[in-house]
Amino acid sequence: MSASRPAAVIVLAAGEGTRMKSRTPKVLHELCGRSMVGHVLAAARELDPERLIVVVGHGRDQVIDHLKQVEPDAIPVVQERQGGTGHAVRMVFEQLGALPGTVIVTNGDHPLLRGATLAEMVHAHEDQGNAATVLSTDIPDPTGYGRIVRDATDAVTAIVEHRDASAEQHAIHEINVGMYAFDGELLGAALGRITTDNAKGEEYLTDVMGILRGDGHRVGAYKAADWVETQGVNDRVQLAQARRQLNERLLLRHMRSGVSVIDPNTTWVDADVTMEPDAVLHPNTQLHGRTHIEAGAEVGPNVTLTDTTVGADAQVSYAVCDSADIGPNTSVGPFAYLRPGTRLAEGAKAGTYVEMKNAVVGEGAKVPHLTYVGDADIGPGANIGAGTIFANYDGVAKHHTNVGSSAFVGSNSVLVAPVEVGDGAYTAAGSTVVKDVPPGAIGIARGRQRNVEDWVERRRAGTASAAAARRAGAGESAAGGEDSAKGDE
Ligand code: UD1
Ligand code: CA
């Protein structure tokens, strides 16, 4: 049932959206990682129109900039003053000329509407040979919407706005969703005949239905089965509701394709997130941008990922990751922060209280606890002891650190970049490493330990410590030497 290629989709996005009470134009408010107009454009794209036209007005600079990023092929048409939806479409014809063929018009503030529903409307339009077809739906509370008026034979005769409707018409629950398919030539001619003779003093696009019908053309309505997806957004309450609806739709799609979502109520995914079967999302997981989760990976609880890839069978819990590439069979968290440029190869670990930035961690290398890794390459099989700091910043510039294959960095080391710990090399616990450590060597850079025998007995006499020391036999040995340091070498 594929319809012919539409001549154009016109998205109306010039209105201010006063009820959002925002500096941001209404259609730029986001849900599930995309602007409202971005969702509408994505649905419009599915129809493969020859031209994708967006009418802009309020906040037009911001809206045009945004269009350049998300839909560079979209043609912006400026509506200087917001003279109504009919006026908006008239501006398109004035600025771009005739549009012969099927023309679809959609409001820009209906982010839930699916491309498939638009396609069904276009199909019905062409199938019935209509001059105009409106997308309608039966809605429990029709307050505020335009009503679909039908005659005794059930044929659509007009759309009447709520403010202009009679008491009898107010009882109609079939409403105009705000999406239409038109014969482009008839639409162009009818726009010039719309008056502003109505409650708002605006040119209503909806009047085209009555005009074409009066001329003896067929006009119709295609009724959408699911009124939820037809809902518009006028304020932030409706925006939050739409976000929840869209999130639920996305999660259902992922679950049906094999992803386990343990708690859909606390799991949020953006529209462009992709996941493979047998991925598992635990409660309080948020996946943003172009995040991708591979088969068998377990993400959550309490994880926020942005533009991050998680490899097969990896485990990520209590973590925040941005633009990270987490390889297969890796382990991240609990309580890890992976920043842009972090790449964990297969089987690597970024454990508890670990922060990484611009760091490449080789296969099977482990960074288990309390560590900052910035601007570094860590070789395969290396082990980074608890409390290690990669000191990458000298106050002016950032420098790089290399840790070789199967190297062992002792706990509480500071690796002062630029520096290199060679393949198979060690650093002693507590070292501040400022010079390269050659392969196979140990770098020791710390004070030596000196034990002063019986110091407690002499200087802390009468304390619990002194009593404990005596019970342990302190002071009984003949050895009076002060130095009994455990050697490093
Ligand atoms: C419109 C319909 C109404 C329908 C409802 C569905 C008309 C006259 N009425 O009413 O039948 O039930 O949508 O939500 O069309 N816009 C412009 N330029 C303008 C005015 C509006 O681009 O001069 C854009 C807005 O940005 C918005 C869309 O057109 O995206 C709809 O405008 P809005 O004022 O919200 O129309 P409604 O009163 O909701
Ligand atoms: Ca509206």
Image: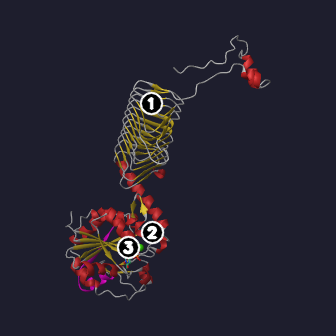
**Which is nearer the eye, 314 or 349?**
349
What amino acid is labelled 3 in the image?
A: Arg
The answer as to whether callout 2 falls within 8 Å of ligand 1 is: no
Mark sitting earlier along the chain (1/3): 3
Q: Nearer the viewer, mark 1 or mark 3?
A: 1
Secondary structure found at label 2: loop
- Residue at the right extreme of this rendering: 462
What amino acid is labelled 1 in the image?
A: Asn
Q: Is residue 39 above or below residue 338?
A: below
Residue 123, position in %: x, y?
Answer: 24, 67
Q: Which residue, given by chain and number where applicable, does mark 2 sit on?
A: 24
**Which is nearer the eye, 133 or 22?**
22
Q: Is residue 205 visible?
A: no
- At 35% from the left and 82% from the top, the residue drawn is 204
Residue 383 is tagged as 1
Residue 184, position in %: x, y?
Answer: 23, 77
Q: Are marks 1 and 3 in contact (CB under 8 Å)?
A: no
Disc 3/disc 2 C-alpha distance (Å): 11 Å
Callout 2 crowding tier (Cα within 10 Å): few <14, some 14–19, many ≥20: some
Does the magenta portion include 172? no
Q: Are marks 1 and 2 in contact (CB under 8 Å)?
A: no
Provide the residue span drawn in magenta: 206-224
Mark sitting earlier along the chain (3/2): 2
Q: Which residue, given by chain and number where applicable, does mark 3 sit on?
A: 60
Secondary structure found at label 1: strand
Q: In the shown orientation, is residue 141 left or right of residue 475?
A: left
Callout 1 crowding tier (Cα within 10 Å): few <14, some 14–19, many ≥20: many
Disc 1/disc 3 C-alpha distance (Å): 54 Å
Residue 200, position in %: x, y?
Answer: 42, 84
What amino acid is labelled 2 in the image?
A: Thr
